[in-house]
Image (spheres, grey):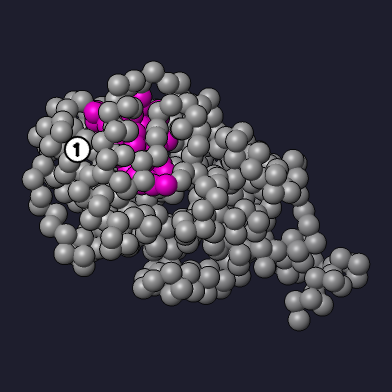
Amino acid sequence: MKIMTILGTRPEIIRLSLVIKLLDQHADHILVHTGQNYDDRLNGLFFRELEIRKPDVFLGVRGDGFAHQVGEILSKSHPLLLQHRPDRLLILGDTNSGLTALVARRLGIPVYHMEAGNRCYDDRVPEEINRRVIDHSSSVLMPYTNRSRENLIKEGFENGRVFVVGNPIGEVLAHYAGRIAASTALADHGVQSRKFFLVTLHRAENVDVADRLPILMEGLILLQRQYGFPVICSLHPHTKAKLKAFQINPSQAGLHFVEPLGFFDFVKLEQSAFCLLSDSGTVQEEACIAGVPSVTLRDVTERPETIECGSNVLAGCDPASILKLVDLVTRENGLWQPPMEYLAKHVAATVCRILLGFHIPDLAEKVWLARSHQIPLKQSDSLDVVSKSK
């Protein structure tokens, strides 16, 4: 069986790391990188650290802005899918790279979506629209949690197409635990365990808004002054550019801006921090598993499980709220239990078994298979789809 996996960003590389290795063993596996994250610190570094082979295809997307980037992803993935003719397409998450699901489904290729069903119900968040588009273009949906599964069922997805597989990050963290423990990140950054804050900011609703990013910086400065702990900010290239564009001085007292970190160093800092402050969805999950309190610098989250279990709170961007909620979550440090789906074992194996052993054939797929293998279709099979495609 021929399976194509398309990815393009750091979180996808990390969470698919074990799945990729299993698919390489058990399928004719084609790995494609769109180039959405083209900086080596967000791309090549993670392939090397996690010992993932190089992609078979690199699309080289360099779109400037949403429309250009998505246009390139769609236009470049179409001939690729026609050339390789995979039996399945695997996608993880809600990035622009995942919108290749649209092309695949138009061609009749079954799409299998990991991280399906995440919802924050706020269309100001670009990824929220991507989530719905990808889910509704997918043949088989693989949510991480039962809550995400419920979201899909409410939207009308059939039970038989939805499989809760668990969150892959717990398994990834366990697999690389030795490498994480060996990281010298604390010494490299001159900090002591539980005596620093770790911050990441990259979401458009935070960093692209001229009157929001400065307020967030003000909150971080106040945090440093109140606790006296260093504040390490892992600086995404886009955030770095916006700080410069908005004329925000990144060398403010107590704020230590660092270039994007490798997986092992970042997780080492993550697991050792006094508190995490981030607008990342994946950091919420990792902090929850690590027993480190987190404050999400957003108004909404698509990971409500972290709120329910008590590991995470939403602070928005108001400095007073940030200070108050950091005080709240750090007083009850580690008293929560992560959702059971975050600690699931054999997630990669489960995903591979579903990919290789389960599908729901539809008429579009029959047409695709016939064209791929030059199998004549019955008149009843081909009429509607072929006539509509003309």
198 in relation to 82, above or below:
above
Please identify the quarter of the rendering in which residue 275 is found: top left
Nearer to the camera, 320 or 265 = 320
CA neighbours of label 1 inside 10 A, class few (<14), some (14 to 19), many (20+): many
Going by the picture, which residue comes out furthest to the bottom?
A: 390
Q: Which residue is mark 1?
A: 223
Q: Is residue 142 visible?
A: no
Where residue 75 appears, x then y in whole percent?
Answer: 52, 74
Nearer to the camera, 235 or 304 = 304
Amino acid, disc 1: Leu
Q: Image point 74% across, 61% down: which residue?
A: 365
20 in relation to 2, above or below:
above
Q: Is 108 in the magenta? A: no
Q: Is residue 385 left or right of residue 79?
A: right
Q: Which region is colored magenta?
A: 272-299
10 in relation to 327, above or below:
below
